[in-house]
Image (cartoon, rainbow, N blue to C red):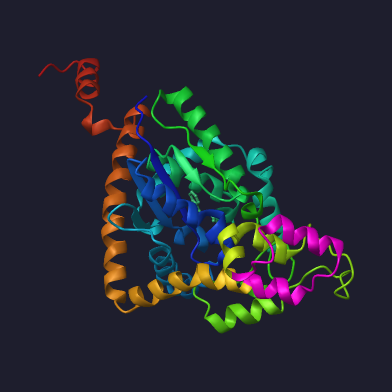
Amino acid sequence: MSMTKIILTGDRPTGRLHVGHYVGSLKRRVELQNSGDFDEIYIMIADAQALTDNMDNPEKIRQNIIEVALDYLACGLDPQKSVMFIQSQIPELCEMSFYYMNLVTVARLKRNPTVKTEIQMRNFEERIPVGFFTYPISQAADITAFKATTVPVGEDQAPMIEQTREIVHRFNYVYGETLVEPNILLPDNAACMRLPGTDGKAKMSKSLGNCIYLSDTEEEIHKKIMSMYTDPTHLRVEDPGHVEGNPVFIYLDAFSTDEHFSKYLPEYKNLDELKAHYTRGGLGDVKVKRFLNNVLQEVLRPIRERRAEFAKDIPAVYKMLQEGSIIARKKASATLEEMKQAMKINYFDDKDLIESQSQKFGQNN
Ligand code: TRP
């Protein structure tokens, strides 16, 4: 096997991207992109996957493609280094999924914990669209089409990578060594694994209104932070507080650095000192929130400003995606050719087949 290192990852375009996407995956992607350690990087806007549970709302998906692309560019993904493309423009992915479906059982799909939770959240009960139920298979196509070695994602995506590895094993076992087994790359900081909503709920979601978006204005960010859920037992400043499970401190875990302390809150050297004071009692929530606001404003300001710059030329953003989709399609198509050869469904390219069939039927030409 070659030592080529390839990244593939992506997002469903169901809304603008938020700070959870940023710490869970986007920030890492940009670092990996700029590390120069990777030979190829593919970043996919998963519109086809988004349609598996939004089939009645294609306009929503359509509107959000450009939002997600702007979020990518704003965070520092660079089309010179990373191929950004749209999933539905790569029909080879459907073809691959069709063959992978033969390698996966219904029982195996039913065990996928992420899909299980998503089915409950959407109240599908018995009316689960088949496309939604099988999206882990299509996700395996997304990953393997590019021969990705590395998939930087949040921990909720771990079952998809696991499923992909199983499909790769099975394909290679049955048809011969063709596909590459991917590895998941999780965030290195526990707080970044799953940033809670500003209301303390485990999941950030647009419908709950508990997300801070990368494109939020300074005022929106300030308002969301000042009304953030904290420790409900911390009623008076003197009361001892809890930092565990407290969204304000989880956000600080994810975003604050020692430099932020020397700049905005020099009475404390670092987050450990701030946490110790809060736990002891005598530290008010407003003071901590003001600090978090300073930190987040500093992190998000350059992203918002770059986003506004890119938004000045929307046709150029579509063009970037179109060019990316052409490059991505070439790669996927090459992999599909190899797969078809391995699966012996490349009839017309196989001179030996035509020759041997001719012999069988007694022709000699
Ligand atoms: N399921 C991912 C999400 O909801 C999006 C996605 C689709 C993806 N295909 C992928 C992520 C392939 C990584 C690799 O965020």
Q: Say which of 96 and 197 sits in front.
A: 197
Residue 234 vertical placement versus 83 (above, below)? below
Place residue 3 in its image quadrant: top left
Residue at 42%, 54% (x, y): give it.
30
266 in the magenta segment = yes
In the rendering, at what x and y percent does residue 290 appear?
Answer: 66, 75
Q: Say which of 76 and 97 sits in front.
A: 76
Q: Is residue 82 visible?
A: yes
In the rendering, at what x and y percent does residue 144 appear?
Answer: 42, 40
Residue at 51%, 67% (x, y): give it.
299
Q: Give the side of residue 143 with respect to residue 318, left or right.
A: right
Q: Give the side of residue 25 with respect to residue 345, left or right.
A: right
In the rendering, at what x and y percent does residue 279 appear?
Answer: 83, 61
221 in the magenta segment = no
Residue lying farthest to the bottom in this orientation = 219
Q: Which residues are magenta?
A: 264-292
Tell me which secondary structure the magenta stretch mostly adopts: helix
